[in-house]
Image (spheres, grey):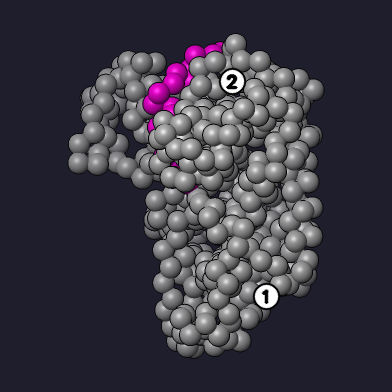
Amino acid sequence: MKIDKQSYQAIFQEFYNMLSNYSNTIVHNSTDAEDVVQEVFIQLWNKRDTLQIKTQIKYYLFTAVKNRSIEVLRKRKMHNKYVELEKNVKESVEYLGDEGEDMVLKEKLHKSIRQLPPKCQEIFVMNKMNGLTYNEIAESLNLSSKTVENQIARALKLLRLKFK
Amino acid sequence: MGLLKFLNNNRSNEEQKLYDWLDDTTQNHTAIKSMLADDSFDLSILKDYKQFDTKNAWSKITSQIDLEDTPVVKSNFSNIYRIAAVGAVLLASVFLVRNFMPNNSGSQMAVITATDMMNEVTLPDGSVVSIDKQSAISFDEDDFMNSRKVELTGRAFFEVTKVEGKNFVVTGNNVNVEVLGTRFEVNAKNENKSVTVEEGRVRVYNDDTEVELTANEKALISGNDITQTYSNSNNIISWKNGTLSFDDTNMTSVIADLEDHFAIDIEIVDEASSNLENCPFTSTYRDEDLESILKDFNESIGTTYKIENDKVYISDLCK
């Protein structure tokens, strides 16, 4: 597999957000998470000629991000379950693991919600993500609960249209 | 045509491996579909999921590496280029400024204004609008499915979902565009108003005139006149995909495209500017900022530039 300028950027665009989210689940700090992912991408470019990526690129990326995230934890001298996990991390595994697969799915879902009409999105997120009831949403946005119900139905319809 | 299908149709076997990661999306697609099938599903899994600033991260990274290090593989260039462009559009971050203001009939008007980046918005009927910087669309929230009417200030690119028997209408600045289902750009800025069609068929009209356009045709609107022409610039939707491409383009058009793309004034300082028309330029820039393009000019055609008070001054151009 050959990485050039164009494919490098395409890979970056596709994976940056989900990898940052992935790292964030380990380091629990957005700035550190982004630093980790940026380092991994810089490494990917600088070593593109010598890197042996035999599997899909995403396995490499997720593994590299995981390793570096654990490195961050170690530097913070934190001892939690992820440090223990480190023993099991190998270079370029053939599977993503549940957390990795989860991130790919979450990114796809999250992206489609980001593209909903703004008001519809706001109401949908309040209900489905934050667990507010129709009445609570109606009250805080000064709308009738019928409108709230309609907007949620609309969000669902648009999402289903996207994933039909 | 979907992204996957597009990719599958356009890549060679050698490229296959590189883009394998895109195929995964079909599995996730199915998973999300079955999740959405139940009205009462729960999105709390996304509670801690964030949207990071990908654009900012990219400029941070490109400041630390040398992307020009490898020669571009010529034969695959255009395909990969297009794929990258598609990816970038899909991932464009959405920053919206929202205002809800009552219109005369008292119903809710949604006003969506593009801010820092190009914005992609899905309308209630599933149509997707990419709104350019300093542009805005508004539509009647309650009546949209019935009227399918959008008002535009500035410039936007539309991908309209087909709804049988229900035309989609864009109005703005004395231009009306009516369509069934298609992809087209409307530029309703004050000067150089235009409609450019990428796919499908649209009707452009005002009180006096009417023209019908199909793919790669363009209507120029000036006052009450509508002139039908062909779109031959490569950069009609440069603001949408971030790519500026010049192919033996005369310098006058190059400067105009740059001014348009970066919304900035450019002044040619030297006296020999009459040469610009006979001064062809060829290059492609993808998601580059203005300064790196100007620096490239310096290196490739020996210009110098300075930026003062949001205005660019270029010297030694086409000497």
Residue B49: horizontal and vertical position, in percent?
A: 54, 53
Q: Report if residue B50 is visible in the image.
A: yes
**Which quadrant holds residue B21?**
top right
Q: Name the subunit of mark 1.
A: A
Residue at image coords 50%, 17%: A46
**Helix, strand or loop at mark 2:** loop
User: Which residue is located at x 65 percent, y 24 percent?
Assistant: A90
Q: Which three-letter amino acid code belongs to the residue tagged 2?
A: Asp
Considering depth in this image, is B72 or A25 the residue closer to the camera? A25
Viewer-proximal residue among B242 and A114: A114
B49 vs A52, left or right, is left
Q: Quadrant of the C terminus of chain B?
A: top left
In the figure, A133 relative to A144: above or below?
above
Q: As drawn, is B271 to the left or to the right of B152?
A: left
Residue B192 appears in the rendering: no
Q: Earlier in the sequence, mark 1 or mark 2?
A: 2
In the rendered structure, are the residues bearing label 1 and label 2 in contact, judged by CB atoms less than 8 Å apart? no
B63 part of magenta stretch: yes
- Above or below for B192 versus A3: below
Disc sitting over residue A4 in the figure: 2
- Left or right of residue B299: residue A150: right
